[in-house]
Image: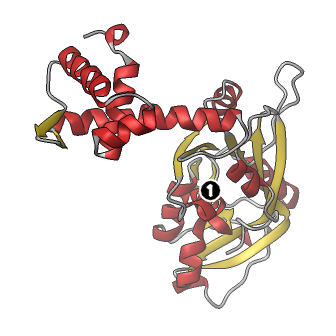
Amino acid sequence: MQLDQLNFHHLFYFWRVAKLGHLTRAAEELHTSQSAISAQIRQLEERIGEDLFIREGRRLTLTDTGQLVLAYADNIFGLGQEMLGRLEGRSVGITRLRVGSVATLSRNYQENWIRPLLANPAIVLTLESGLLEGLIARLVQHQLDVVLANETVPVHPDRPLHCRFLGSQSISVVGPASRWKSQSLRIPDDLDGEDIALPGPRHASRAQFDALCASSGVSPRIRAEVDDMAMLRLIARDSGWLTVLPEVVVQDELRAGVLVTVGHSTILQESFYAITTPHRHRIALLEQLLSRPAESAVGI
Protein backbone atom coordinates (compact mmCIF):
# COMPACT_ATOMS: atom_id res chain seq x y z
CA MET A 1 0.00 0.00 0.00
CA GLN A 2 1.28 3.47 -0.93
CA LEU A 3 0.96 6.43 1.42
CA ASP A 4 -1.58 8.14 -0.84
CA GLN A 5 -3.80 5.05 -0.44
CA LEU A 6 -3.89 5.39 3.35
CA ASN A 7 -7.20 6.89 4.48
CA PHE A 8 -6.39 9.05 7.51
CA HIS A 9 -10.09 9.38 8.31
CA HIS A 10 -10.26 5.62 8.79
CA LEU A 11 -7.05 5.75 10.82
CA PHE A 12 -8.54 8.45 13.05
CA TYR A 13 -11.62 6.31 13.76
CA PHE A 14 -9.37 3.36 14.61
CA TRP A 15 -7.32 5.61 16.92
CA ARG A 16 -10.34 6.79 18.89
CA VAL A 17 -11.72 3.25 19.29
CA ALA A 18 -8.31 1.97 20.40
CA LYS A 19 -7.85 4.84 22.89
CA LEU A 20 -11.37 4.64 24.31
CA GLY A 21 -11.48 0.83 24.22
CA HIS A 22 -15.12 0.68 23.13
CA LEU A 23 -17.11 1.21 19.95
CA THR A 24 -20.07 2.76 21.79
CA ARG A 25 -18.02 5.47 23.48
CA ALA A 26 -16.16 6.20 20.24
CA ALA A 27 -19.48 6.52 18.36
CA GLU A 28 -20.80 8.94 20.99
CA GLU A 29 -17.62 11.04 20.86
CA LEU A 30 -17.57 11.13 17.05
CA HIS A 31 -21.36 11.65 16.69
CA THR A 32 -21.82 8.69 14.38
CA SER A 33 -23.08 5.11 14.55
CA GLN A 34 -21.18 2.08 15.77
CA SER A 35 -21.79 0.37 12.45
CA ALA A 36 -20.24 3.28 10.52
CA ILE A 37 -17.12 3.21 12.69
CA SER A 38 -16.86 -0.58 12.45
CA ALA A 39 -17.18 -0.43 8.67
CA GLN A 40 -14.42 2.17 8.35
CA ILE A 41 -12.05 0.20 10.60
CA ARG A 42 -12.69 -2.90 8.47
CA GLN A 43 -11.79 -0.88 5.36
CA LEU A 44 -8.54 0.16 7.05
CA GLU A 45 -7.80 -3.47 7.90
CA GLU A 46 -8.45 -4.48 4.30
CA ARG A 47 -6.03 -1.79 3.08
CA ILE A 48 -3.36 -2.88 5.55
CA GLY A 49 -4.03 -6.55 4.93
CA GLU A 50 -4.13 -7.53 8.62
CA ASP A 51 -6.59 -7.45 11.49
CA LEU A 52 -6.18 -4.60 13.99
CA PHE A 53 -8.59 -5.95 16.60
CA ILE A 54 -9.54 -9.37 17.91
CA ARG A 55 -13.32 -9.29 18.23
CA GLU A 56 -14.83 -11.36 21.03
CA GLY A 57 -18.47 -10.37 21.20
CA ARG A 58 -18.51 -6.70 22.15
CA ARG A 59 -14.95 -6.81 23.42
CA LEU A 60 -12.16 -5.46 21.22
CA THR A 61 -8.52 -6.37 21.86
CA LEU A 62 -5.67 -4.97 19.81
CA THR A 63 -3.62 -7.42 17.80
CA ASP A 64 0.18 -7.04 17.58
CA THR A 65 -0.35 -5.15 14.32
CA GLY A 66 -3.01 -3.02 16.03
CA GLN A 67 -0.55 -2.11 18.80
CA LEU A 68 2.01 -1.04 16.18
CA VAL A 69 -0.52 1.02 14.20
CA LEU A 70 -1.76 2.63 17.45
CA ALA A 71 1.78 3.75 18.33
CA TYR A 72 2.08 5.54 14.98
CA ALA A 73 -1.46 6.94 15.20
CA ASP A 74 -0.62 8.38 18.64
CA ASN A 75 2.28 10.26 17.07
CA ILE A 76 0.31 11.38 14.01
CA PHE A 77 -2.73 12.71 15.83
CA GLY A 78 -0.78 13.82 18.88
CA LEU A 79 1.29 16.05 16.62
CA GLY A 80 -1.91 17.28 14.99
CA GLN A 81 -3.33 18.30 18.38
CA GLU A 82 -0.04 19.94 19.30
CA MET A 83 0.02 21.87 16.01
CA LEU A 84 -3.49 23.21 16.54
CA GLY A 85 -2.64 24.18 20.09
CA ARG A 86 0.48 26.04 18.95
CA LEU A 87 -1.51 27.92 16.30
CA GLU A 88 -4.11 28.89 18.88
CA GLY A 89 -1.49 29.90 21.46
CA ARG A 90 -2.25 27.18 23.99
CA SER A 91 -0.73 23.92 25.15
CA VAL A 92 -2.56 20.72 24.24
CA GLY A 93 -1.37 17.25 25.25
CA ILE A 94 2.29 16.61 24.55
CA THR A 95 4.60 19.59 24.04
CA ARG A 96 7.71 18.98 21.97
CA LEU A 97 10.72 21.22 22.52
CA ARG A 98 13.58 20.97 20.02
CA VAL A 99 16.84 22.32 21.43
CA GLY A 100 20.03 22.75 19.44
CA SER A 101 23.35 23.22 21.22
CA VAL A 102 26.70 24.16 19.72
CA ALA A 103 29.25 21.38 20.05
CA THR A 104 31.58 23.54 22.16
CA LEU A 105 28.92 24.20 24.82
CA SER A 106 29.03 22.25 28.08
CA ARG A 107 26.49 19.42 28.21
CA ASN A 108 26.23 20.07 31.96
CA TYR A 109 25.13 23.61 31.18
CA GLN A 110 22.57 22.33 28.68
CA GLU A 111 21.19 19.83 31.20
CA ASN A 112 21.03 22.50 33.92
CA TRP A 113 19.09 24.73 31.54
CA ILE A 114 16.47 22.12 30.63
CA ARG A 115 16.29 20.54 34.11
CA PRO A 116 12.98 22.25 35.05
CA LEU A 117 11.35 20.27 32.20
CA LEU A 118 12.72 16.82 33.00
CA ALA A 119 10.01 15.93 35.54
CA ASN A 120 7.18 17.09 33.27
CA PRO A 121 5.45 14.04 31.71
CA ALA A 122 3.88 16.21 28.99
CA ILE A 123 7.27 17.26 27.56
CA VAL A 124 9.12 15.47 24.76
CA LEU A 125 12.64 16.82 24.22
CA THR A 126 14.74 16.63 21.06
CA LEU A 127 18.37 17.59 21.74
CA GLU A 128 20.82 18.16 18.89
CA SER A 129 24.37 19.44 18.71
CA GLY A 130 26.46 20.77 15.87
CA LEU A 131 28.11 23.83 14.37
CA LEU A 132 26.40 27.14 15.02
CA GLU A 133 25.65 27.97 11.38
CA GLY A 134 24.05 24.59 10.76
CA LEU A 135 21.91 24.91 13.88
CA ILE A 136 20.85 28.44 12.93
CA ALA A 137 19.82 27.21 9.47
CA ARG A 138 17.59 24.58 11.11
CA LEU A 139 16.22 27.20 13.52
CA VAL A 140 15.25 29.52 10.67
CA GLN A 141 13.50 26.61 8.93
CA HIS A 142 11.55 25.95 12.19
CA GLN A 143 13.20 22.56 12.63
CA LEU A 144 14.50 23.75 16.03
CA ASP A 145 12.79 25.93 18.63
CA VAL A 146 15.91 27.35 20.30
CA VAL A 147 19.68 27.19 19.92
CA LEU A 148 21.99 27.40 22.93
CA ALA A 149 25.36 28.94 22.12
CA ASN A 150 28.42 30.50 23.71
CA GLU A 151 28.65 33.23 21.12
CA THR A 152 26.24 35.67 19.49
CA VAL A 153 25.22 35.52 15.85
CA PRO A 154 25.93 38.29 13.33
CA VAL A 155 23.01 40.57 12.52
CA HIS A 156 21.59 39.81 9.09
CA PRO A 157 18.64 41.74 7.57
CA ASP A 158 17.31 38.63 5.80
CA ARG A 159 17.57 36.46 8.90
CA PRO A 160 15.98 38.17 11.92
CA LEU A 161 16.91 36.40 15.14
CA HIS A 162 16.52 37.07 18.85
CA CYS A 163 19.69 36.48 20.87
CA ARG A 164 19.01 36.45 24.60
CA PHE A 165 21.84 36.59 27.16
CA LEU A 166 21.50 33.73 29.67
CA GLY A 167 24.50 34.33 31.90
CA SER A 168 28.27 34.08 32.05
CA GLN A 169 30.96 32.35 34.05
CA SER A 170 34.66 32.80 34.60
CA ILE A 171 36.92 30.33 32.84
CA SER A 172 38.91 28.42 35.45
CA VAL A 173 42.00 26.26 35.57
CA VAL A 174 41.29 22.94 37.28
CA GLY A 175 43.56 20.09 38.22
CA PRO A 176 43.55 16.78 40.09
CA ALA A 177 42.94 17.20 43.82
CA SER A 178 45.73 14.70 44.56
CA ARG A 179 48.29 17.24 43.38
CA TRP A 180 46.69 20.68 43.63
CA LYS A 181 44.37 20.52 46.65
CA SER A 182 46.46 22.90 48.78
CA GLN A 183 47.90 25.04 45.97
CA SER A 184 46.68 27.98 43.93
CA LEU A 185 48.17 29.45 40.78
CA ARG A 186 48.41 32.95 39.39
CA ILE A 187 46.79 32.93 35.96
CA PRO A 188 48.51 33.04 33.54
CA ASP A 189 51.92 33.64 35.19
CA ASP A 190 52.27 30.25 36.89
CA LEU A 191 51.22 28.25 33.85
CA ASP A 192 54.57 28.53 32.07
CA GLY A 193 55.75 25.02 31.14
CA GLU A 194 52.79 23.28 32.81
CA ASP A 195 51.04 20.40 31.02
CA ILE A 196 47.62 21.72 30.05
CA ALA A 197 44.51 20.77 28.10
CA LEU A 198 42.65 23.58 26.34
CA PRO A 199 39.38 24.16 24.53
CA GLY A 200 39.87 23.89 20.77
CA PRO A 201 40.43 26.90 18.51
CA ARG A 202 36.69 27.11 17.71
CA HIS A 203 35.78 27.67 21.35
CA ALA A 204 34.94 31.28 22.23
CA SER A 205 37.29 31.32 25.23
CA ARG A 206 40.35 29.98 23.42
CA ALA A 207 41.31 33.27 21.76
CA GLN A 208 40.97 34.99 25.15
CA PHE A 209 43.32 32.48 26.79
CA ASP A 210 45.92 32.62 24.00
CA ALA A 211 45.94 36.43 24.10
CA LEU A 212 46.31 36.43 27.90
CA CYS A 213 49.30 34.08 27.77
CA ALA A 214 50.93 36.00 24.90
CA SER A 215 50.61 39.32 26.74
CA SER A 216 52.39 37.83 29.77
CA GLY A 217 55.03 35.91 27.80
CA VAL A 218 53.79 32.60 29.21
CA SER A 219 54.00 29.32 27.26
CA PRO A 220 52.14 26.36 28.80
CA ARG A 221 52.89 22.92 27.37
CA ILE A 222 49.70 22.19 25.40
CA ARG A 223 48.87 18.48 25.67
CA ALA A 224 45.39 18.50 24.15
CA GLU A 225 43.02 20.80 22.28
CA VAL A 226 39.41 19.66 22.56
CA ASP A 227 36.28 21.18 20.99
CA ASP A 228 33.82 18.83 22.66
CA MET A 229 33.25 19.79 26.29
CA ALA A 230 32.20 16.27 27.29
CA MET A 231 35.58 14.98 26.10
CA LEU A 232 37.44 17.86 27.76
CA ARG A 233 35.69 16.92 31.01
CA LEU A 234 37.01 13.32 30.73
CA ILE A 235 40.52 14.55 30.01
CA ALA A 236 40.38 16.92 32.99
CA ARG A 237 39.25 14.03 35.18
CA ASP A 238 41.67 11.34 33.97
CA SER A 239 44.81 12.93 32.52
CA GLY A 240 46.44 14.50 35.56
CA TRP A 241 47.04 17.69 33.56
CA LEU A 242 45.71 21.14 34.24
CA THR A 243 42.64 22.00 32.17
CA VAL A 244 41.16 25.35 31.16
CA LEU A 245 37.36 25.33 31.09
CA PRO A 246 34.17 26.76 32.62
CA GLU A 247 33.59 25.11 36.00
CA VAL A 248 30.08 24.02 34.95
CA VAL A 249 31.74 21.47 32.65
CA VAL A 250 33.24 19.61 35.63
CA GLN A 251 30.65 20.51 38.25
CA ASP A 252 30.23 16.89 39.39
CA GLU A 253 33.98 16.30 39.73
CA LEU A 254 34.40 19.53 41.71
CA ARG A 255 31.57 18.57 44.07
CA ALA A 256 33.06 15.10 44.54
CA GLY A 257 36.53 16.52 45.23
CA VAL A 258 38.14 14.67 42.32
CA LEU A 259 39.14 18.01 40.77
CA VAL A 260 39.86 21.36 42.36
CA THR A 261 40.01 24.89 41.01
CA VAL A 262 43.63 26.00 41.11
CA GLY A 263 43.15 29.43 39.58
CA HIS A 264 41.02 31.65 37.39
CA SER A 265 41.15 35.02 35.70
CA THR A 266 38.34 37.54 35.55
CA ILE A 267 39.53 38.36 32.04
CA LEU A 268 38.50 34.91 30.84
CA GLN A 269 34.73 34.60 30.55
CA GLU A 270 32.29 32.34 28.73
CA SER A 271 28.86 33.77 27.98
CA PHE A 272 25.74 31.77 27.22
CA TYR A 273 22.98 32.76 24.80
CA ALA A 274 19.59 31.44 23.68
CA ILE A 275 18.85 32.16 20.03
CA THR A 276 15.27 32.06 18.76
CA THR A 277 13.30 33.29 15.76
CA PRO A 278 10.75 36.10 16.14
CA HIS A 279 7.83 33.89 15.07
CA ARG A 280 4.54 34.48 16.86
CA HIS A 281 3.64 30.88 17.66
CA ARG A 282 5.63 30.51 20.83
CA ILE A 283 5.92 27.64 23.30
CA ALA A 284 4.90 28.70 26.80
CA LEU A 285 7.39 26.37 28.53
CA LEU A 286 10.23 27.73 26.40
CA GLU A 287 9.26 31.26 27.36
CA GLN A 288 9.42 30.26 31.02
CA LEU A 289 12.95 28.92 30.57
CA LEU A 290 14.02 32.08 28.79
CA SER A 291 12.63 34.30 31.53
CA ARG A 292 14.56 32.60 34.37
CA PRO A 293 17.36 34.52 36.18
CA ALA A 294 20.47 34.78 34.04
CA GLU A 295 22.74 32.67 36.27
CA SER A 296 20.27 29.87 37.04
CA ALA A 297 21.94 27.23 34.85
CA VAL A 298 25.54 28.24 35.51
CA GLY A 299 26.17 27.75 39.21
CA ILE A 300 28.06 24.79 40.62
**Residue drawn at 61 percent across, 88 percent down:** 181
Nearest the viewer among 85 and 282 is: 85
Q: Mark yes or no: residue 196 visible.
A: no
Nearest the viewer among 111 and 2 is: 2
User: Which image quadrant for residue 162?
Assistant: top right
User: Which image quadrant for residue 56?
Assistant: top left
* Left or right for 161, reference 222: right
Q: Residues within 10 Å of mark 1 (few under 14, many from 20)?
A: some
Nearest the viewer among 278 and 171 is: 278
**Residue drawn at 71 percent across, 26 percent down:** 140
**Residue drawn at 31 percent across, 23 percent down:** 36
Report how many numbered discs are placed on residues in the image: 1
Question: What is the x, y in percent for residue 202?
Answer: 68, 41
Quarter of the image where the N terminus is located: top left
Quarter of the image where the C terminus is located: bottom right
Question: What is the x, y in percent for residue 188?
Answer: 79, 67
* Left or right for 228, reference 76: right
Question: What is the x, y in percent for residue 22?
Answer: 28, 43
- Where does label 1 land, which residue? 110
